Image: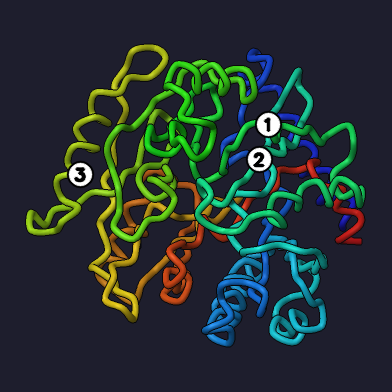
């Protein structure tokens, strides 16, 4: 049975590689490309989750259960394998592997490998990570991909060192056909790459990710966001020239004007062929505040796409949660939509997409993990 399943997975990858994508010499893979696993990192006393560690570990158990119940493989970084095994003991171990290594924080989206196709071959790019513009310690996070390469989890034919350029996975999104959607505040931040201009950033994205069409959002910011407007909190690309975006209908919300300007700019964007995008508005969650009364950057745009399921963050707001899931279903009619309660995850100013990084098939040596 395993041989048959592996053959089907390989066939899916060949189909993807033989698509029009391969006409481009280098292509940043979209999240809906065929996947092997999801990379995560477990909360421990060495992370910023220490002050609510039990609650945080229970949050990660919820996520892992939801993924493994759907037969999505999870590769979990952990400081202490025994600690992680104890918390995750009720998760399906056929789809869970624990890899002991050092890291500062659990937001693997921003320091995990970014995957591309170059000359019809897969590559895992290891970009620099500096704690979202030198805001937080990141020395260990910045070495995770290198350690996986040294331990042969990523082979030398796949791994590429791109660490001379700082780039977080949550700051860029793609349609897989050469278009990259990002934000000016983040990529042109002086604390990341010295405040390069849009034109300079575009050239780097062309060179390293194969971008042929780069769209910079100049507007859009959520209160409590410490990433300088990561695109995965604001707007996400989908097949068929669709962009889902975070909207705001409450004129009294402090974020209303900024998100309205973002919507207007999105309506002006054009595809590489000069056509308007199909825009789909996601609801904005009702405000969520931390223990100090500061608003947290809750967003439904922070969903995770896998081969057959889209996992949506939910915030104990039944009407908004349901509307968000129904909205995403419009853009991904062939995917099932499953909600995961992320009310704890948001307390550290991130959500589901931030805590996960998809690993396309054949990027990792998964024989090490899954026999």
Based on the displayed image, in which of its 4 quarters is residue 314 positioned? bottom left
* Residue at the spot of label 3: 258
* Residue at the spot of label 1: 164
Q: Earlier in the sequence, mark 1 or mark 3?
A: 1
Q: Secondary structure at mark 3?
A: helix
Query: Can residue 238 be seen from the camera position used here?
Result: no
The C terminus lies in quadrant: bottom right
- The residue nearer to you, when weighing 371 against 52, is 52
Based on the displayed image, in which of its 4 quarters is residue 30 positioned? top right
Query: Can residue 195 be seen from the camera position used here?
Result: yes
**Residue 178: image x %, image y %?**
53, 21
* Residue at the spot of label 2: 128
Q: How is the image coloured?
A: rainbow
| 2 and 1 marks in contact (CB < 8 Å) | yes
Give how far apart the Cα atoms at labels 2 and 1 are.
6 Å
Q: Secondary structure at mark 1?
A: strand
Give the residue at x 47% y 25%: 196
């Amino acid at each position: 049975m395993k041989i048959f399943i592996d053959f089907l997975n390989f066939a899916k990858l060949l189909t993807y590689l033989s698509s029009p994508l391969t006409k481009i010499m280098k292509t940043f893979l979209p999240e809906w490309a065929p996947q092997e696993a999801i990379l995560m990192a477990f909360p421990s006393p060495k992370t910023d989750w220490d002050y609510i560690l039990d609650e945080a570990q229970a949050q990660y158990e919820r996520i892992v259960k939801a993924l493994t119940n759907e037969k999505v493989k999870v590769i979990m970084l952990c400081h202490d394998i025994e600690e992680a095994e104890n918390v995750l003991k009720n998760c399906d171990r056929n789809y869970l592997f624990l890899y002991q290594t050092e890291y500062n924080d659990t937001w693997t989206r921003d320091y995990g490998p970014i995957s591309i196709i170059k000359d019809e071959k897969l590559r895992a790019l290891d970009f620099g990570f500096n704690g979202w513009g030198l805001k937080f310690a990141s020395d260990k996070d910045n070495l995770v991909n290198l350690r996986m390469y040294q331990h042969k989890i990523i082979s030398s034919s796949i791994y590429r060192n791109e660490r001379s350029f700082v780039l977080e996975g949550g700051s860029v999104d793609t349609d897989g056909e050469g278009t990259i959607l990002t934000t000016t505040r983040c990529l042109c931040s002086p604390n990341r790459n010295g405040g390069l201009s849009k034109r300079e950033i575009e050239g780097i994205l062309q060179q390293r990710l194969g971008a042929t069409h780069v769209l910079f959002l100049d507007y859009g910011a959520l209160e409590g966001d410490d990433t300088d407007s990561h695109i995965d909190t604001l707007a996400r690309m989908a097949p068929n020239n669709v962009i889902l975006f975070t909207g705001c209908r409450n004129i009294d919300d402090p974020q209303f004007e900024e998100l309205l300007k973002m919507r207007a700019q999105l309506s002006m964007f054009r595809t590489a062929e000069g056509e308007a995008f199909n825009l789909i508005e996601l609801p904005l969650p009702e405000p969520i505040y931390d223990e100090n009364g500061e608003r947290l950057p809750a967003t439904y745009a922070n969903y995770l796409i896998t081969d057959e399921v889209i996992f949506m963050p939910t915030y104990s707001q039944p009407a908004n949660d349901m509307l968000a899931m129904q909205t995403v279903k419009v853009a991904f009619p062939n995917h099932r939509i499953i909600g995961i309660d992320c009310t704890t995850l948001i307390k550290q100013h991130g959500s589901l997409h931030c805590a996960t990084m998809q690993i396309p098939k054949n990027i990792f040596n998964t024989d090490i993990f899954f026999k």
